[in-house]
Image (cartoon, rainbow, N blue to C red):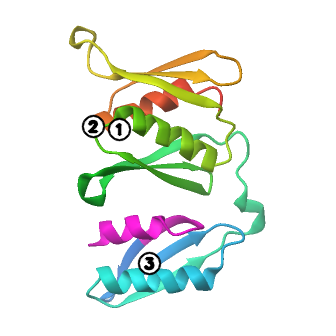
Amino acid sequence: MKDALELELRQLTGVWFVSFSDQDGLTVIEIVVGPGTDPARVREEATRCAVTHLEEPAEIRILVPPREQTLPSRRERVKLVLVLPSDGGAAIEVQLSRGFQRCSTRAVAGDTAAVGRAVVEALRGLGANAPFDVVGIHALPSDWGAGLLAVLKDTTTGELRRGVATGRAPADAAARAVLAALNRSV
């Protein structure tokens, strides 16, 4: 139940981070929100979600980082937070982070190119300059080892970039391969 609740909370506008802890039979939900986000609105929506998913009482704590921490430095790397099935397995949720920022996008399950496009969309959601299209995601021949090859095209220069990665599942490998292809540009 908490996994489903966490995924739903992460989809709320302005939410950057969600954590759970148990304190004397009470579930404490901490939610970090970005600048300009209305904490009262997030608390109201989070309360509605918690009532739907939890049987035990919950306390929701909304945290707003100090202004100087809200914008990540240009040198902070983008991290792949998760690649998980959602919507009953019909979709894949891709979540990236950069500093305190998080961005989540979805792709059709079973379509590694769609997962690659979701990664590029999430990068843009984090404010990265990512003028790339996914040309294709290809499985490596078995005699080369496991993994996927992502081929991306820079829409401004026409340059092709390639990245190779493995993962727990094809969607995870596709997300990692796209990030490997873009490693030096975002």
Q: Quadrant of residue 2?
A: bottom left
Q: Are marks 1 and 2 in contact (CB under 8 Å)?
A: yes
What amino acid is labelled 2 in the image? Arg
For disc 2, the marked residue is 168
Regarding mark 3 in the picture, which secondary structure is present there? strand
The residue that appears at 28% across and 52% down in the rendered structure is 90
User: How far apart are the alpha carbons under marks 3 and 1?
Assistant: 27 Å
Q: Residues within 10 Å of mark 1 (few under 14, many from 20)?
A: many
| Residue 83: % across, % down | 37, 46
Q: Earlier in the sequence, mark 3 or mark 1?
A: 3
Q: Give the residue displayed 71% in from the left and 68% down from the top.
A: 35
Judged left or right of residue 132, residue 113 is left
Q: Is residue 43 above or below residue 74?
A: below
Seen in the picture, residue 133 relative to 62 is either above or below; the reply is above
Question: Can residue 6 be found in the magenta stretch?
Answer: yes
Local secondary structure at mark 2? loop
